[in-house]
Amino acid sequence: MSVKTKEAARLKRRRRVRAKVVGSAERPRISVFRSNRGVSAQLIDDRTGSTLAAVNWTEAELRELRGVEQAKRAGELLAQRAQAAGVQTAVFDRGGYRYHGRVQALADGAREGGLTF
């Protein structure tokens, strides 16, 4: 029996999700990274390998917020930047994390900001 760390198990789940979720220019992938200190997300066109929009917790507007409210505001900012880039719909890649807490709040914020997925 092999011993798996939490990170190794998350990466295995991430690969499983990425095998099914692919972003395009019309419908890019929202890739989420969650750390202990904050969340970041990117809109990625997998066909060209380019990032169309991104948001990071280290930005001045998000730095003073904590937890779920930081993630929700990050989702709203990502939706604004996506619409500026001409994106209306996306697919959500939870990155191997459970769809709960900050990850769910980021998705809800992006939906409230105008993105559909």
Image (cartoon, grey):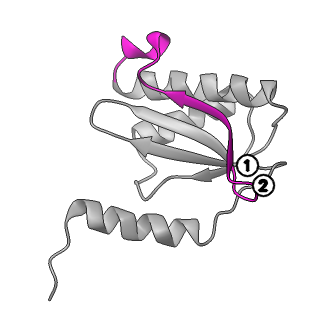
Position of 5 relative to 117 (above/below): below
Residue 86 vs residue 111, the one in the foreground: 86
Within-10-Å neighbours for mark 2: few <14, some 14–19, many 20+ = some
Left or right side of 29 for 108: left
- Where residue 2 appears, as percent x and y from the top left, is 16, 84
Left or right side of 12 for 86: right
- Where residue 46 appears, as percent x and y from the top left, is 70, 57
Amino acid type, residue under disc 1 in the picture: Pro
Q: Quarter-wise, where is residue 102 in the image? A: top left
Instruction: Examine the structure image and report whether residue 18 is included in the region drawn in magenta.
Output: no
- Where residue 75 appears, as percent x and y from the top left, is 58, 30
Q: Look at the numbered discs 2 and 1 and tell me whether their residues touch, using CB distance below 8 Å.
A: yes
Left or right side of 27 for 10: left
Q: Which residue position holds label 2?
A: 24
Q: Give the alpha-carbon distance from disc 2 to disc 1, as whole Å.
A: 5 Å
- Where residue 55 appears, as percent x and y from the top left, is 55, 28
Quarter the N terminus occupies: bottom left
Q: Quarter-wise, where is residue 83 in the image? A: top right
Residue at 52% over, 35% down: 106
Q: Secondary structure at mark 1?
A: loop
Within-10-Å neighbours for mark 1: few <14, some 14–19, many 20+ = many
Q: Which residues are magenta?
A: 45-66
Position of 90 relative to 76 (above/below): below
Q: Secondary structure at mark 2?
A: loop
Q: Which residue position holds label 1?
A: 28
Residue at 27% over, 60% down: 7
Amino acid type, residue under disc 2 in the picture: Ser
Residue at 53% over, 38% down: 41
Instruction: Examine the structure image and report whether residue 48 is included in the region drawn in magenta.
Output: yes
